[in-house]
Image: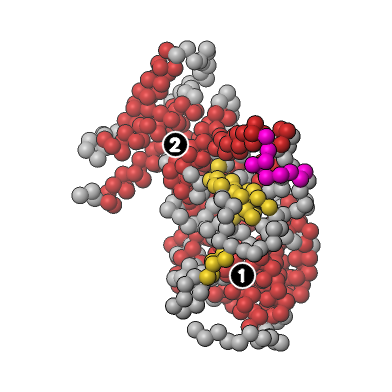
Amino acid sequence: MIDEPTRRLDEGALRALVPRVLAGLVRRGEDFDAAEDALQEALLEALRVWPEHPPRDPRAWLATVATRRLVDARRSEAARHRREEATYAEPRAAETEEGDDTLFLLFCCCHPDLAPASQVALTLRAVGGLTTREIADAFYVPEATMAQRISRAKRALQGRRLDQPGDLAVVLRVLYLVYTAGHAGRVDLAGEAIRLTRQLTLATEEPEVRGLLALMLLNHARLPARLDSEGRIVTLDRQDRGRWDTREIAEGVRVLQSALAMRTEERRPGRYQVEAAIAALHDDAASAEETDWPQILAWYDDLVALTDDPVRQNPAAVLGRAVAVGHVLGAVAGLRETDRLREVLGERHRWHAVRGHLHELSGDLAAAAAAYAEAARLATNVAERDHLVRQAARARAAGPGRNRRLPERSP
Amino acid sequence: MPKYLLLKHYRGGPEPHRPMPPMDQWAPEDAEAHMAFLKHVGELLEENGEYVGAQVLTPARTWVRYGGPDAAPVTTDGPLPETSDLVAGWYMIDVESHERAVELAAYVSSGPGPGGEPQYEWIDVREVMSEASSED
């Protein structure tokens, strides 16, 4: 019998080696595409061979097998005279830290020339070590489609210089995309994003990286309470806070504090740190009533101040701020804030959902029901649509002047 | 990444930009060219990593409803107005954005009709609701 926990542990350890080995190959001057293919083959072989014959040095084993595959591939390629001339970059210093490898590979995978979906797929495979099948499952597309997306992305990287420092902001955006890509399905993408971001904090002192890690942890901590046993969405104000993960909250707060400690007059906290601070304030409230809305509003003020034109550049922040305004200055003031967003977000379900919430706060249940119903009509997600339909029905049933034209249905 | 259905219709939808008879009345080479184009679209989507699925439906339609306790299902295949919507098939795609879905739908609509000229067929673009719930 296979010992499941042990086997899974081995796979986890194996996947942790992926960025280190791949970075080693690419730094040595190997073509990214070929090196990634070779490493995938080496991983498959490892899964086959290691249970019987565990290697003494797993990383060296993988590097050796992947190199052998590369040599084989190059030989057969040369035999076919496919490649006229191969150029190899100068090898870089051999001794590098694990964190550096992760950062280097993330810069490759999150190359600004790639489309976001390709950046995400490539990151999950080349840095996360997920199989194409797992990535395909996570995004509900056929495996062949994901394989094609990955190989196109890798081809797009060919001939690009990969030895330059990349754009960290793009890397953070990709990691956040992975995090938000969904918690359902067989693959825990949120957990994967947290793992990768944690690795990245080892590679750079940049406070926004820690801000992003904190934000993920502080939101992820509430995950167990977000759905009820029937899979229905439970809004923050109704969640069973006893089900929040206090260990994750504690880590998130610690990470956030270490990021904020680095702020100076010239270097204000970026969007991830600010959003993490807001999440931390929600996590800190023992009940919804004890939420420190004035402080949350102050952080939202900072968040919208990060861009010149928040309504266009970060409408989600303006919308979040409107909720905080509603709780601090009253629902009418909050609704007035949402008016500015009508042009940008008027066709999005979240805008109507927030207005439903603010109408409900103001006691206008008929308007709340109408806004929720409109939000439900615009929702692009089954769980959210169902939740908004329920909100609309609840507000309508509780409101005045309800009209029961239809006879009660017998159960 | 949102998913979209690009629905093709046998009939229904907005006024045709270029009215044309059903394909069985086209010149054989024109019908051939059209079918080759549809195959090419499928391959293009696969090549792009945007393909999720494609199906063609027969035009025969049966409407069915519950007949009540202990009764057989009630079925009907008419009479229905000739203008009622009749879906012919679809591509399901997984793309970066709504704009990309519209771009692909326009391409599908450019397929050759009689005489090899573009069909200008109306394509019904529908977003598929995702299963996973997003963050708060």
Q: Residue at x 51, y 40 (%)?
A: A145
Q: Is residue A99 visible?
A: no
Query: Percent position (x, y) of residue B63?
Result: 57, 64
Q: Residues within 10 Å of mark 1 (few under 14, many from 20)?
A: many
In front: label 2 or label 1: 1
Residue B128 placed where, x, y %?
Answer: 59, 55
Q: Main secondary structure of the magenta part?
A: loop
Q: Residue at x 45, y 40 (%)?
A: A132
Query: Badge 2, how many Cα within 10 Å: few under 14, some, many 20+?
Result: many
**Which is nearer the eye, B6 or B18?**
B18
The chain identifier of the residue carrying mark 2 reads A
**Rendered image: mark on residue A19:** 2
Q: Position of residue A54 (x, y in %)?
A: 25, 37
Extent of the magenta region: B18-27
Q: Name the residue beneath numbered marker 1.
A: A388
Relative horizontal placement of residue A113, taking residue A79 as reference (left or right):
right
| Picture residue at 50% right of the left edge, 77% below the top | B68
- Tell which of A154 and A6 is nearer to you: A154
Q: Relative to the observer, which residue lies in front, A148 or A325?
A: A148
Q: Earlier in the sequence, mark 2 or mark 1?
A: 2
